[in-house]
Structures are given as C-alpha cells and as structure tokens.
Amino acid sequence: MNKPIGSIMNKDVYTCHYSQTLEDVVKILVDKEIGGLTIVDDDKRVVGFISDGDIMRSVAKQKTRSIFGGADSVMVLYDDESFEQKVAEFKQRNVMELATRKVYCVSPDKSIEEVAEILSKKKFKKIPIVDKDGTVLGIARRSTIIRYIFKILFELPLQE
C-alpha cells in the first residue's frame, strides 16, 4: 500500500506573504513555535521558504574574509557590527532577501515513502504540499511521518 502524503499532511500551514518584513516573520515563528515558513503570493502559491536557520545566518558573526579582485587588488570584508545592530537593521528588510526561492514542493498524491525519502536525502525538516498550480494545500514535516510510523507500529496486530 502506497498511502499518499495528502492523507496525513498538516492542513494548518503557517505562511507569510512575500511582502512581509523579517520582523513579521520572527514574530510568527516565535508566536507559533515553528522553525520555518512557506512564503506565498496573493494567490497562495509558493514563492519561497524561510527558516530559523536563514535568520540565524544573517545575524551570526561572520568571519573576516579577503576577496581577490585580480592582479593586485584585494578587498577585505570585516564584520564589525554588534549582534544587536544586525538585528535592528534586519527588522525592516523584506523576507525575500533571506528566503530560499527555489522551494522543493510535492503533490498530495506523492507516497509517504517517497516524501520520507526526499526529506531524508535532502535533509529537509518539512516540505510544502501543493496543487498543480503551486497553491499551498498543506505541509509534511518529519514529525508528521514519525507520528504515522508510530501509529502503524502500535495499531498493527501482533504477528505470531
């Protein structure tokens, strides 16, 4: 039996609009206690994804690095802003500045097994479920599949 992911997907999907700020996004992540948001357009089609990891990378201390411009030119980039300065500056930035724009999505008829493989191989924690037009229908998280595994394990009759 190849049960489709649509049968177990989470239908309550937290999203944000592509016009929202990073301040808006952080508020949603904290309020909903989640680690990422699917970004949608006016028609609820997926246009990006932002995770708490994307946000962490933007405020984390960056190593000083040299960029060679050819011949004798060298540019050295320093990270001399405080953590608080970085946070203050990023508040009003648009979510799409940090978002992943190439979002891997699956249709609701994709098998649970196939989605588990995608999550595992690509090291994703979640994947949006979309219709043929790219409109968000739900989301599958690793925890969604783990709960399904648990259900199978404890609802199957014992084999003799």
Image (cartoon, grey):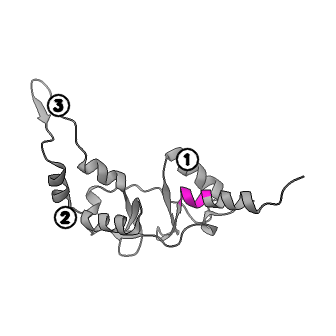
- In the displayed structure, would residue 123 be above or below residue 94? above
Is residue 76 visible from the viewing direction of this image?
yes
Q: How many marks?
A: 3
Asked if the stretch drawn in magenta spans residue 49, the answer is: no
Question: What amino acid is found at the position of numbered circle 2 in the picture?
Answer: Gln
Q: Position of residue 144 (x, y in %)?
A: 57, 61
Q: Which residue is mark 1?
A: 120
Residue 2 visible in the picture = no
> Which residue extends farthest top?
71
**Three-letter residue code for mark 3:** Ser
Question: What residue appears at the point 50 percent right and 46 percent down from the top-left corner?
Answer: 122
Q: Which residues are magenta?
A: 141-146
Judge from the rendering whether residue 5 lies leftward or rightward of residue 133; answer left or right: right
Count residues near mark 2 (Cα–Cα under 10 Å), then give few for <14, some for 14-19, many for 20+: few
* 145 falls in the magenta region: yes
Q: What label sits on residue 92 in the rendered view?
A: 2
